[in-house]
């Protein structure tokens, strides 16, 4: 999770450093994840973290929370109870850390079947009829797949405005009742539970106009969207050098949402890990001489990351090379954008001290989302960049950087194939 950006638009003078407060196995923690995470707050606070991204809080058909059903029923979460969550958030707030809720609203699991045996009767989790929907709130073109079985949930709503999810009925976000009741639920998460901001799961599943509406209705202090599309690849199976189209998709989403949200910089993650795996660090300089990811064009609205519960953890859908993770953190924690640290790397991989050294260097030198980058070297085995002319970061297997680093800079931290200097 990372430091929080303030709404309207991201504040270039603020420092955001995010940490993801869970992984794919957290819901299985004996005694409850909320009760476990609260013990780690002092360590998180000592590392200069400003925001913590928490898992989906509601009842769900899957223990991880990404197939939500009774949205108001937080006691049925596998991570802990509603009171435990409120206590956790209150503790984070007491030391100035903001809490970001994982908002899963593209799709929803039904409570029971209709008279035709289709799963499309929803229960909100309250005694009244809030979020108690039926087929009219499901997209008319929704298709749900389970293995080789394809089912129609009987939706009679508007056509889907984004990508199909397949794992559960896609909700019709053009329905005014859906818009109103989801907005009310999110505002309840703010006022009653204490959340400060949102991480929009599978945000490409509905139009950015919809996200803009929810942003306006709920006015979070911070918001980040998950727009995960594949990079473009060449015939050699490697990512193409030019990923401008990929990063512009992220930028267009941010603009369409109104400019006050951020997006996970999947472009930077993909290029960075390809460059390190292939020994092709020249990839880290685009044709205009700047960073090739979203941070090269719209850094204030980019959330950089090395891995998360999807790409890494036990899912490993697109994992960063494990022996090069620290080089990844050197890049994102010294460069522009809003860096996000993965729970596993910080707590389970023995990297807490190395990562914390980097966050302290970032804070000490006032590096922020809008900082400027001057790339000093981008060879196959060496990448060196000066950020705000206050710090210089080096990654790559080449040890000797020659005279690239001025004598006015002194080493601040170093490790396996990386180093960071500070101006004296």
Image: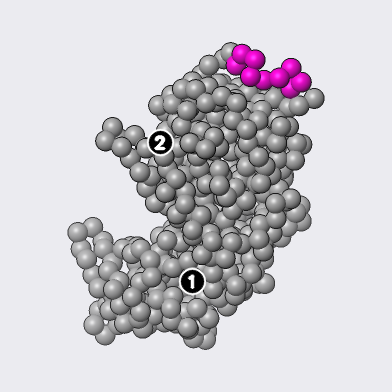
What residue is shown with label 2?
241
Report if residue 49 is visible in the image.
no
Which residue is rendered at x = 40% and y = 64% of the image?
205
Q: Give the residue furthest to the front.
A: 288
Main SS of the magenta segment?
A: loop
What segment is highlighted magenta in the picture? 401-409
* Magenta stretch holds residue 406: yes
Q: Earlier in the sequence, mark 1 or mark 2?
A: 1
Q: Position of residue 351 (x, y in %)?
A: 59, 31
* Magenta stretch holds residue 362: no
Q: Position of residue 55 (x, y in %)?
A: 53, 57
Residue 224, quarter of picture: bottom right
In the displayed structure, 68 sits above or below 380; it is below
Give the left or right position of residue 128, taking residue 361 as reference.
left
Q: Give the residue furthest to the left.
A: 148
Report if residue 296 is visible in the image.
yes
- Label 2, secondary structure: give it: loop
Which residue is rendered at x = 44% and y = 75% of the image?
173
Give the left or right position of residue 179, taking residue 51 as reference.
left
Q: Disc 1 versus disc 2: distance between alpha carbons?
A: 33 Å
Which residue is rendered at x = 42% and y = 33% of the image?
274
Nearer to us in this view, 182 or 46: 182
Q: Give the residue furthest to the right.
A: 424
In the displayed structure, 103 sits above or below 154; it is above
Give the left or right position of residue 221, taking residue 203 as reference.
right
What residue is shown with label 1?
210
């Amino acid at each position: 999770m990372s430091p929080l950006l303030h709404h309207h638009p991201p504040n270039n003078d603020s420092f955001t450093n995010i940490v993801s407060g869970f992984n794919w196995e957290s819901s299985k923690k004996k005694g409850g994840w909320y009760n476990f995470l609260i013990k780690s707050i002092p360590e998180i606070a000592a590392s200069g973290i400003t925001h913590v991204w928490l898992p989906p809080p509601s009842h769900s058909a899957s223990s991880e929370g990404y197939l939500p059903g009774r949205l108001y029923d937080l006691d049925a979460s596998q991570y802990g109870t509603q009171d435990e969550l409120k206590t956790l958030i209150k503790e984070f707030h007491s030391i100035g850390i903001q809490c970001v809720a994982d908002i899963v609203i593209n799709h929803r699991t039904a409570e029971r079947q209709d008279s035709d045996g289709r799963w499309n009767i929803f229960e909100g989790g309250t005694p009244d009829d809030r979020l108690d929907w039926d087929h009219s709130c499901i997209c008319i073109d929704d298709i749900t797949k389970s293995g080789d079985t394809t089912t129609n949930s009987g939706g009679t709503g508007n056509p889907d405005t984004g990508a199909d999810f397949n794992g559960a009925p896609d909700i019709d976000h053009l329905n005014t009742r859906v818009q109103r009741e989801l907005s009310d639920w999110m505002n309840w998460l703010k006022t009653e539970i204490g959340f400060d901001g949102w991480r929009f799961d599978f945000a490409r599943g509905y139009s950015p106009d919809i996200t803009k509406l929810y942003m306006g209705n709920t006015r979070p202090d911070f918001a980040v969207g998950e727009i995960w599309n594949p990079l473009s690849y060449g015939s050699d199976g490697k990512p193409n050098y030019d990923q401008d189209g990929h990063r512009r998709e992220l930028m267009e989403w941010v603009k369409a949402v109104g400019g006050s949200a951020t997006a996970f910089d999947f472009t930077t993650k993909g290029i960075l890990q390809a460059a390190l795996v292939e020994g092709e660090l020249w990839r880290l300089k685009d044709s205009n001489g700047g960073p090739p990811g979203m941070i090269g064009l719209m850094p204030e609205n980019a959330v950089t990351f090395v891995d998360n519960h999807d790409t890494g953890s036990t899912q490993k859908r697109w994992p960063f090379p494990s022996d090069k993770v620290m080089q990844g953190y050197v890049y994102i924690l010294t460069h522009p954008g809003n860096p996000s640290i993965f729970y596993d790397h910080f707590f389970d991989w023995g990297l807490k001290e190395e990562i914390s050294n980097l966050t302290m260097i970032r804070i000490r030198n006032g590096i922020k989302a809008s900082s400027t980058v001057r790339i000093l070297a981008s060879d196959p085995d060496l990448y060196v960049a000066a950020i705000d002319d206050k710090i210089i970061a080096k990654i790559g297997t080449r040890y000797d950087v020659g005279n690239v680093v001025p004598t006015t800079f002194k080493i601040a931290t170093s490790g396996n194939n990386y180093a960071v200097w500070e101006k004296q």
